[in-house]
Image: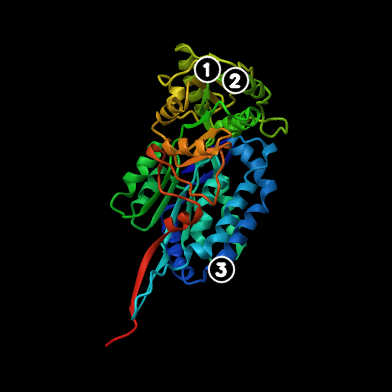
Amino acid sequence: MTVKLISPIDGSVYAERPYTTDAALDVAIARARAAQAEWALVPVAQRVKLVLGFLDAVLAMNDEIVPELAWQMGRPVRFGGEKGGLEERCRYMASIAAESLQSFVPEEKAGFRRYIKHEPLGLVLVVAPWNYPFLTAGNTIFPALMAGNAVILKHAAQTLLVGERFQQAYEKSGLPKGLFHNVVLSHEQTEKLIGSGKIRHINFTGSVAGGKAVERAAAGSFASLGLELGGKDPAYVREDVKLDHAVENLVDGSFFNSGQCCCGIERIYVHEKVFEPFLEAFVDLTRKYVVGNPLDQATTIGPMARGSFADTVRDQVAEALRKGARPHIGMKVENDRAGSPYLAPEVLTNVDHQMAVMREESFGPVVGIMKVRDDDEAVTLMNDSPYGLTASIWTTDEDSAASIGDRVAAGTVFMNRCDYVDPGLVWTGVKDTGRGVTLSQFGFHNLTRPKSFHLRTKIG
């Protein structure tokens, strides 16, 4: 059996690969576990050096990767792929690896030597998504290897070639053989692997339904889980906002990558005193976007990864319009029709939380904007969601931003920025957005287990 990668550019079969056989998967797991036992004994500094070689090998392919991403999931080539973010995150994690992984020593106790080591978990499975296929996978792959683990990568069918690029880079890196394997698995194979007891940590990025399936499959295996699932990230624009800055960044945060961003902005609440000028500027800037073939340098919004994803957004917009929402863009785009992945951006007002577009994940180029009276109303609406990945507050008052942030249910609270992952801070979510963490020192702790040493040094 094979899996076909259908390109959103023209609907053609861009790649087709056979599924990894059960026998080949068993061999990969056995080799990874054997390699990991030796890798765990390698000093952290040496592990970091070799993993950075792995990163360098990925970055060296960037000129080939950028058009491949356009063909696979529709991101315009003008944005240059994911090289910058991937490098920033990996190099930061490399810079803190030694300190994050060093043993913890409690207060001195006469006659004893006591410490806690961070031991690698063993075999880590990364089930990666298509929307940021290098970044999301790299968030776990590189730190997991630095921490002394082996890694099995199962990438999304929509971005099959990304898994192959990681494998090619690994083979050039000088890392021990058998330590990393890219595999192509069906859902059934993936669930069986998760529940096999051979995997010690699973990192999954995807839908809430997918996260629940992973939890069910892992039940009884005692493997740890990292789940980054759905999102409906809000922004709150206060009356003391620096308007031009907020508009520029929130338009980008709403529509970059055709809105297919885990932490993209999907709903905006604007203080009534600045609502009209904010809306006017937001709409004007959105109208300057160019929807088209992602291989064209002029294109700023490419097709969504699949036509079915675009249809979900179309359905949300249609429902909102039936209930009284007002559209502001109305951009005419060739091929923008049912079943097509090409979809123009849209801005909606007269929206409320009875509409799916304000409550359910859109993951596409649409944003609803609501007027609010004050901070309290904004916080209530921001928290009126089953999700909680990020939230952003746009204000010139730092103390107010922090105070409001304390009341918002989110894994990350931003002030005057959005749609960004800072590797120095933990990346996590609350509610249906999932559990577990990546990046920062806490990301390393999530990929290791504490082991206590209690050594009596004096007897009698």
The answer to whether the residue labelled 1 contacts the one labelled 2, judged by CB atoms less than 8 Å apart, is: yes
Q: Is residue 12 visible?
A: no
Left or right of 413? Residue 240 is right
Which residue is most to the bottom? 460
Q: Which residue is mark 2?
A: 279
The residue under the point 52% across, 23% down is 271
> Which residue is the site of mark 3?
45
**Amino acid type, label 3:** Ala
- Determine the CA span between mark 3 and mark 1: 54 Å
Q: Residues within 10 Å of mark 1 (few under 14, many from 20)?
A: some
Residue 140 placement (x, y as % from top left): 49, 53
Give residue 191's position: percent from left, percent from top. Answer: 37, 47
SS at circle 3: helix
User: Which image quarter is the C terminus in?
Assistant: bottom left
Q: Give the mark nearer the N terminus: 1 vs 2.
A: 2
Give the mark nearer the N terminus: 3 vs 1: 3
Residue 168 in the image: above or below residue 340: below
**Circle number at residue 349:** 1
Q: Quadrant of residue 260?
A: top right
- Nearer the viewer's eye, disc 1 or disc 2? 2
Mark-to-mark CA distance, 3 and 2? 51 Å
* Residue at the image position 42 percent from the left and 21 percent from the top: 353
